[in-house]
Image: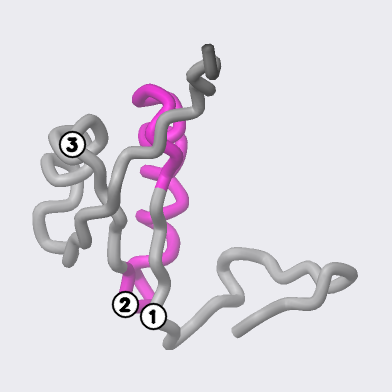
Amino acid sequence: MLAQEHERHPVTSIKGQKVLIAPLDWGLGHASRCIELIQILKHQNNVIIGITPSTAPLLCNVFPELKTVDIPALSFFIKPKY
């Protein structure tokens, strides 16, 4: 289900979908904030969690029953060109 920019759908209205949740790898804050979202979505959807080496311990511990997919950790630091 792809929503147009002007459309808003409550999370609870998403049903019977395959949903990939992949928190940003900028610390555990993003991953921990996704826990409630995953708990809501997993009741009526097939949730897959995108994990990085730093988010895996938290998310795999909280949701051992869910399928995970390894994703690369993206660096947000720009290396200067000298």
Q: Are marks 2 and 1 in contact (CB under 8 Å)?
A: yes
Q: In the drawing, what numbered circle is on residue 69?
A: none
Q: Residue furthest front?
A: 82
Q: Is residue 34 left or right of residue 58?
A: right
Q: Is residue 9 left or right of residue 36?
A: right
Q: Is residue 74 left or right of residue 69?
A: right
Q: Amino acid at mark 1?
A: Lys
Spatial separation of the CA atoms under disc 2 and disc 3: 23 Å
Find disc 2 in the rendering and name its residue. Answer: 46
Find disc 1 in the rendering and name its residue. Answer: 18
Spatial separation of the CA atoms under disc 2 and disc 1: 5 Å
Residue 20, above or below 75: below
The residues colored magenta run 23-47
Q: Amino acid at mark 2?
A: Asn
Residue at screen point 49% across, 19% down: 79
Q: Residue 53 placed where, x, y %?
A: 18, 36
Q: Residue furthest top?
A: 82
Q: Residue furthest right?
A: 6
Residue at screen point 39% across, 52% down: 22
Q: Earlier in the sequence, mark 2 or mark 1?
A: 1
Residue at screen point 60% across, 76% down: 13
Q: Is residue 42 left or right of residue 67?
A: right
Find disc 3 in the rendering and name its residue. Answer: 53
Q: Secondary structure at mark 1?
A: strand
Q: Quadrant of the N terminus?
A: bottom right
Q: Secondary structure at mark 2?
A: strand
Q: Is residue 48 magenta?
A: no
Would you identify the image quadrant in which residue 17 lies? bottom left
